[in-house]
């Protein structure tokens, strides 16, 4: 399971479009699509129902998306906390 793939899933769910999600994630649409496919394989179920016109969450996706969002949020909180710790450490040295 790859953190970037988890992020892809949260953005695709919000955008309801792999193309727009890829744009927001600064990757190509095939990269995003492949990352989500790998994520779905690793967690054992399809997160999305894909049609030619739109992307919707599957029943499985509706259940697992909140868990995925928790992990993505935790990563963001960790990054923010680390920046603060590094800043505090730099000020303590000065």
Image: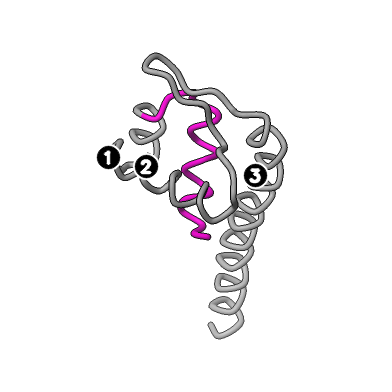
As displayed, is residue 53 above or below residue 45? above
Task: Give the label on residue 69, or none.
Answer: 3
The reply to whether callout 2 and callout 3 are in contact (CB within 8 Å) is no
The reply to whether callout 2 and callout 1 are in contact (CB within 8 Å) is yes
- Mark 2: secondary structure: helix
As displayed, is residue 43 above or below residue 26? below
| Residue at image coords 61%, 29% | 58
Magenta stretch, main secondary structure, is helix
Binning the other alpha carbons within 10 Å of mark 3 as few (below 14), some (14 to 19) or many (20 upward) gives some
The reply to whether callout 1 and callout 3 are in contact (CB within 8 Å) is no
Task: Give the label on residue 32, or none.
Answer: 2
State left or right for residue 21 relative to residue 7.
Answer: left
Indicate how the structure is coloured in the image.
one colour
Mark 1 to mark 3: distance in Å?
A: 22 Å
State left or right for residue 20 relative to residue 28.
Answer: right
Mark 2 to mark 3: distance in Å?
A: 17 Å
For residue 89, which quarter of the picture?
A: bottom right
Mark 2 to mark 1: distance in Å?
A: 6 Å
State left or right for residue 12 relative to residue 61.
Answer: left
Q: Position of residue 32 (x, y in %)?
A: 37, 42
Task: Give the label on residue 28, or none.
Answer: 1
The earlier-in-sequence mark between 2 and 3 is: 2
Nearer to us: label 2 or label 3? 2
Magenta stretch: give its range.
1-18
As displayed, is residue 21 above or below residue 37? above
Binning the other alpha carbons within 10 Å of mark 2 as few (below 14), some (14 to 19) or many (20 upward) gives many
| Residue at image coords 32%, 42% | 26
| Residue at image coords 57%, 37% | 47
Please check the rendered image and state whether residue 5 is part of the magenta-colored stretch, yes or no. Answer: yes
């Amino acid at each position: 399971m790859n953190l970037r793939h988890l992020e892809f899933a949260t953005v695709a769910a919000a955008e309801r479009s792999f193309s727009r999600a890829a744009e927001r994630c600064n990757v190509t649409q095939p990269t995003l699509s492949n990352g989500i496919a790998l994520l779905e394989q690793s967690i054992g179920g399809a997160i999305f129902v894909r049609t030619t016109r739109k992307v919707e969450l599957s029943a499985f996706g509706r259940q697992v998306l909140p868990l995925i969002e928790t992990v993505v949020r935790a990563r963001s909180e960790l990054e923010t906390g680390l920046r603060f710790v590094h800043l505090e450490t730099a000020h303590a040295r000065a």
